[in-house]
Amino acid sequence: MKGTTVFRIRSFSTFLGARFFLTFGVQVQALMLSLQVYGLDKSAFSLGLIGLAEAVPFMMLILPAGYWADIYRRKTLILISAALFFFCSSILFLLCHFDLKPDLITLYALVALTGVARATGGPSMQALVPQLVDRQLLPQAIAWNTSFWQISSIAGPAAGGLIYAYRGLESGYLCTLMCSLMALVLFFWVPAFKESHERKTGIWINLREGIDFVRSKPVILSALTLDLFAVLFGGAVALLPLFNDQILHAGPEGLGWLRAAPSMGAVLTAAWVARTPPMRYTGLFLLAAVAGFGVCMMGFALSDVYMISFVFLLLSGAFDAVSVLIRSMIVQMLTPDAMRGRVSSVNSIFIGSSNEIGAFESGVAARFLGLIPSVVFGSSMTLFITALMAWKAKSLRKLRLDSY
């Protein structure tokens, strides 16, 4: 079976296109917001608060959103999410266009609304993929879905840095506005599947089922826990404006390429893995990838040469792509369709929010430990947790997806 067979399915290709535009626009918006916040208050703590502002509403809504994804039409929830992103991008563009100079509270409030949008549509987007393709094509579909997400994550920050450097903040938000509109239109063309799963009395009973399912599957729980702590302690993306300004001195274009570097490495890896998903020795691949990510982040923290820092970020993205792909395959292939929304929401609590909470942790650690020591500490914790999981989680270490 060719690694590109899944592209013959029009509904899946349309979904990929919609998600590409949405992710591209969100990445550009995230870069513009970080630059705008840093321009108002040049501190690591303020940058870290961007992540916290998004994580709080996300955490509050993600479990109910998983329940909704299992009982309502997933396409409807995705459209609501895309519409909220479009609304946020419209407000940011208008504020900039009319030179209204929003304060930090206003910017954090709009970030919080994007957290609501992510929570509303996130579980439905993950749960919809297995409905668009046959089961034998599912590993391939998951791999390409991850690859396209990474491609858009490359192009977004790189394009955002160049747009900001040559056209300014307003053009960046205009780009975000057009991308979110395009995503909204394309999502309308994705087929709708009516969910007919049995509803039990009370939302909390249904939510408990998703949590209990994850707890009953040691492989899933171990994979999510490993990725949670790796992202929580190991990431340094939120601090890139400070590294760029205080250590690397590369300007807005350089910051854009630094933001894009992890995704560039991820695409190079994901495009290869998408053709040959790691079905054998899956657990060992996951452990090695997370350890490699930790080593790269430590190397980045200790470098003061732009190209060396860029290479470490590139390699960190390559390792991260493998871990993200394997985790997605584990969750999707080991979960029945009737519970995919709720399990995806539990997955998002472990992983989706860890990026934002990790950004807050990075900002706080940088404030009290210093910029470089905070990243060295975080990457050391990532390596320690990976070693601990390799020792304790026997089911993960021996996992082979070709047996499912």
Image: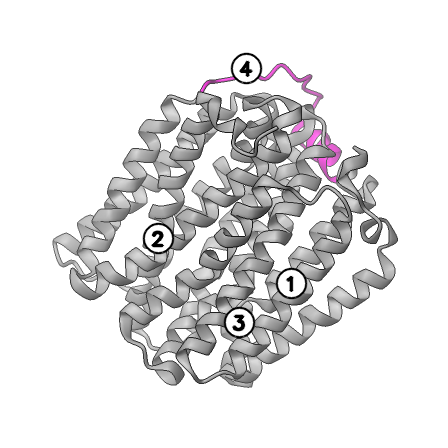
| Mark 3 residue type | Ser
Q: Earlier in the sequence, mark 4 or mark 1?
A: 4
Span of residues in magenta: 191-211
Query: Would you place residue 113 above or below residue 128 in this image?
Result: below
Say which of marks 1 and 3 sits in front.
1
Dot 3, crowdedness within 10 Å: few (<14), some or many (≥20)?
Answer: many
Which residue in the structure is indicated by mark 4?
194
Which residue in the structure is indicated by mark 3?
362
Dot 1, crowdedness within 10 Å: few (<14), some or many (≥20)?
Answer: many
Q: Which of marks 3 and 2 is nearer the N terminus?
A: 2
Measure how far apart labels 1 and 3 are at the Cα level. 13 Å
Question: x, y percentage for residue 193?
Answer: 53, 17
User: In the rendered structure, does residue 193 fall within the stretch colored magenta?
Assistant: yes
SS assignment at label 1: helix
Do tag 4 and tag 3 residues touch (Cβ < 8 Å)? no
Residue 112 visible? The answer is: no
| Mark 1 residue type | Ala
Q: Quadrant of the C terminus?
A: top right
Query: Would you place residue 141 above or below residue 96 in this image?
Result: above
